[in-house]
Image: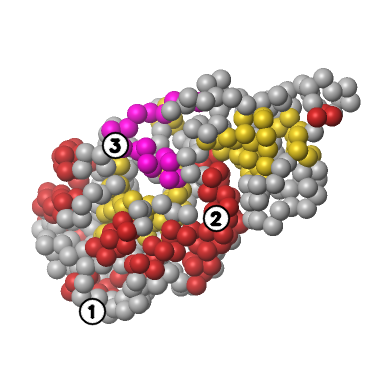
Amino acid sequence: MMAMNMSLNMIPVKKTPGDVQWFVHDRFGLFIHWGIYALPARHEWVKTRERIPEEKYDIYFKNFDPDLYDPEAWMDVAYRAGMRYVVVTTKHHDGFCLWDSALTDYKATNTPARRDLIKPLVEAARARNMRVGFYYSLIDWHHPDFVIDGIHPLRDHPDVEALNQKRNQERYAAYLHGQVEELLTRFGQVDIMWLDFSYPNRPGGGKGRADWQSEKLYSLIRRLQPNIILNDRMDLDEGWDLVTPEQLQPREWVTIKGERVVWEACQTFSGSWGYYRDEASWKSVDQLVRMLIDTVSKGGNLLLNVGPTARGEFDYRALERLNGIGEWMKWHSRSIYGCTQAPKDLVAPEDCRYTYNPETGRLYVHLFAWPFKHLHLDGLAGKVEYAQLLNDASEIQIDTSLQPGDKKGFVDRQTLTLVLPVQKPPVTVPVIELFMKK
Ligand code: GLC
């Protein structure tokens, strides 16, 4: 694969059981958190945060009527934003299922929605050649056998112990395995299984591998879909493909026990994952584009989340962000797809991020701030054949008066200096494409 630029030193990544090749190429996916928590519209954890009893939470189940749901439109928006895969919540912590599971009545088909909401989404994604992943919550605040623990809505109930006497976590685990089996047998090829989450050491009682019977679940998943990409949240030390830091940008390529791993930053627009009407902390298009670049510059993927409304739409703020990202991606996706961290020893200048495509041998400089006239790139003197702005393919000249051997003392022998236009190009983050000498 690394036929060109053998001289540029790429760093190895931990081998994965699943097929991650398409994944590390595509780099950018859409996360969807959708469920009946879209009605209260104040966080997908609302049931437990507000300790809402089952009978009261039921009002959302009774009134879930996404009359404007149009998965084709959703996938169009995502595709235009440059996303090439989608991970959707089939069930979140509140236990509500969006597909027509045979193992529960607590599902979309029994709400006014009256239909399986997952199937048409899967079809819409596939029609656009987008890969499909299923988020499935290991946690279940609806199932009567799920043992009440430190984050359960009933945690403060005066009779927790008595209630737990009647609950049987093993029976719940059987249900969970059964549901995962449905998801992996009813929808054709599933590209990602995204299980969420384990908290074995939580004060007040947590859950981990013994509660989910993770080893058994693991074998089931690999048997049903051998190439699937599995995330890292079922509390197993080995076997996962994907590490998933959420709501934070790691400082560098994520490592586990000193080894670089395949990783995916999962991020929100405004803080919560489910639709949150009143949240005011929306990130700007500019911040989100930088987030994507920053992630790829550290060898990761970005899974960016939208929480659709209870009527079944992406709200205006989400659309504005996704369209804005799409504007940037239209000209710059070449610095994202197939790209990764630059070879070691190459350090990007201040306010810049590098990404690198090992197949084409092109290095991309993303400028978070636009300097005046000169951009100095350490260690690249004599290594670049040609440079251009990515948005309009206009040449960026290499300043030969300041090249190796220069007597003026501005730059050292290893530094390549580019001559930039005074005006910043009219894009969120300008990118310079460097064609490396072969
Ligand atoms: C967390 C949260 C959850 C969200 C998820 C996404 O574990 O519990 O609401 O689905 O992370 O990463």
Amino acid type at circle 1 is Pro
* Mark 2, residue position: 330
The N terminus lies in quadrant: top left
Residue 59 sits above or below residue 218 on the image: below
Residue 386 lies, in percent from the top left, at 67, 34
Q: CA distance from mark 1 to mark 2?
A: 39 Å
Q: Residues within 10 Å of mark 3 (few under 14, many from 20)?
A: some
Determine the residue positioned at 65% across, 56% down. 427
Residue 95 lies, in percent from the top left, at 23, 62
Residue 272 sits above or below residue 415 on the image: below
Amino acid type at circle 2 is Lys
Q: Residues within 10 Å of mark 2 (few under 14, many from 20)?
A: few
Q: Mark 3 or mark 2, which is nearer the start of the sequence?
A: 3
Residue 91 lies, in percent from the top left, at 26, 60
Amino acid type at circle 3 is Gly
* Mark 3, residue position: 18
Name the disc covering residue 112, or none: 1
